[in-house]
Each structure stands twice: as structure tokens, then as C-alpha cells.
Amino acid sequence: MFTGLVEEIGAVSALEPQGDALRLSIDASTVLSDVALGDSIAVNGVCLTVVEFTPDSFLADVMQESLDRSSLGHLVVGSPVNLERAMKVGARLGGHIMQGHVDGTAELISRTSSEHWDVLRFSLPVEVDRYVVEKGSIAVNGTSLTVSAVGDGWFEVSLIPTTLEETTHGQLKHGDVVNLEVDVLAKYVEKMLAGRADDDQWGAKG
């Protein structure tokens, strides 16, 4: 589990295709301070397992499904990535509960800058649009953000300078692809309500 509070920006140092998988080497520092083999680290919001590490980098394997569902397949050597270690029990939950399971990808449509913040507009895939609401939470490349506006096929987030500086969002350009993870609580509620509707339907027939 993660909170969506990015701990540092890492950099891809190598990519090694392995059949239907990809091995990533990522340069980092903060997330390696207490790392152990098998630990989970979110890379642009995708939960990956540390398979090897050195004092200043770690390796993680990405299976085909993750490549198909996320933007990790777009990475090249030198790409900056948001990194976060798995949350600790008892620690403050500064963002929102995230699993590191990407629900879809989106593209940056526009960026509007002002003196104190930037407004980023992203495309909104139809398969997740029902979970995205104004003032709700959404994870964009592993960062817990608040939705500031929603429209037909798009949503916006408003980012303060700290977020722009401490995550990769400050470097995003028009057309860049990002990972989305919607609030898992919304999906649970949807399933429970669907189950209740089914129960009511069977009760009416009985």
C-alpha cells in the first residue's frame, strides 16, 4: 500500500528486455535508505518489487501486463520517475490509500501556469471516468492529487510549486502519457451497490 506522497524523483539508468518482461534499473537514494530484497517501491505509481540493489540504484522486473496497462513501456534511459516506498503501519496517511495497481493511462492535454500554481488537464479514459469526481482523489504517476474539475473526457488538477518541484509533474509536456489509479474505495462501493441491486432483483422475483 502507498499514500501517493512521492519521496524522490529517480532516473531510469538501464532497460533490459527479457522476453515478455522488462528489467528496469533506477538510480535513487532516499527510497534505498532501508531497502531490502523483495520490498515494494512504486515507480510512477506502479508497484514493483526490488530484485537487486546497490547503494545508489535498484532493479525491478516489469511483467507484460504492467507494460500493457501502464506508461512504463514509454520509459527510456534518463527518464525521471516518481518513487515511493510502501507505507508503514502507524505512519501518517498524508495522501490517500493507493495500491500501486494502475487502472489506465491518460495524456496531458494542456497546462496553464499562473503565479502560484499550474493547472494540468488530462484526458479521462471512459473505463474510469465514473470514479473521478470533483474534489475527489486520484493518483497521477503515483502522486495523490485532488481533482479540481471534471469535464467530458477530461479532468484537471491544480498543482502548487512544491508538488511541481518534488515530482515529475513539473516536467510533463503536452502529449506525455501518465498512469492513473482511481480511489479503490469508489470501486468497492460500486461493487457493493451492484450486489445489493442484484439481491433486490432476486427478492422481487421471489
Image: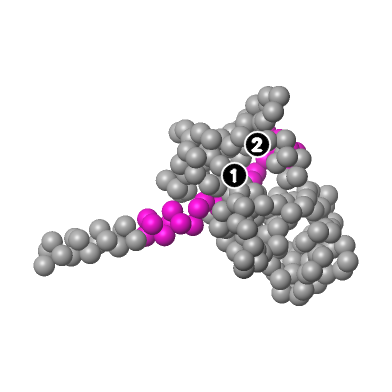
**Which of the image's four quarters has the C terminus?**
bottom left
Rounded to the nearest angstrom, the CA distance separating label 2 from label 1 is: 8 Å
Of 160 and 179, nearer the camera is 160
Q: Position of residue 191 (x, y in %)?
A: 37, 60
User: Is residue 110 toward the left or the right of residue 24 in the image?
Assistant: left
Residue lying at the far right in this picture: please name it.
55
Q: Position of residue 128 (x, y in %)?
A: 47, 48
Q: Position of residue 134 (x, y in %)?
A: 47, 38
Of 76 and 80, nearer the camera is 80
Q: Which residue is mark 1?
A: 145
Image point (72%, 35%), residue name: 161
User: Is residue 192 toward the left or the right of residue 17 in the image?
Assistant: left
Q: Which residue is mark 2?
A: 159
Q: Which residues are magenta?
A: 168-191
Image point (55%, 47%), residue name: 138
Residue lying at the far left in this picture: please name it.
206
> Which one is earlier in the sequence, the residue at label 2 or at label 1?
1
Q: Position of residue 78 (x, y in %)?
A: 83, 49
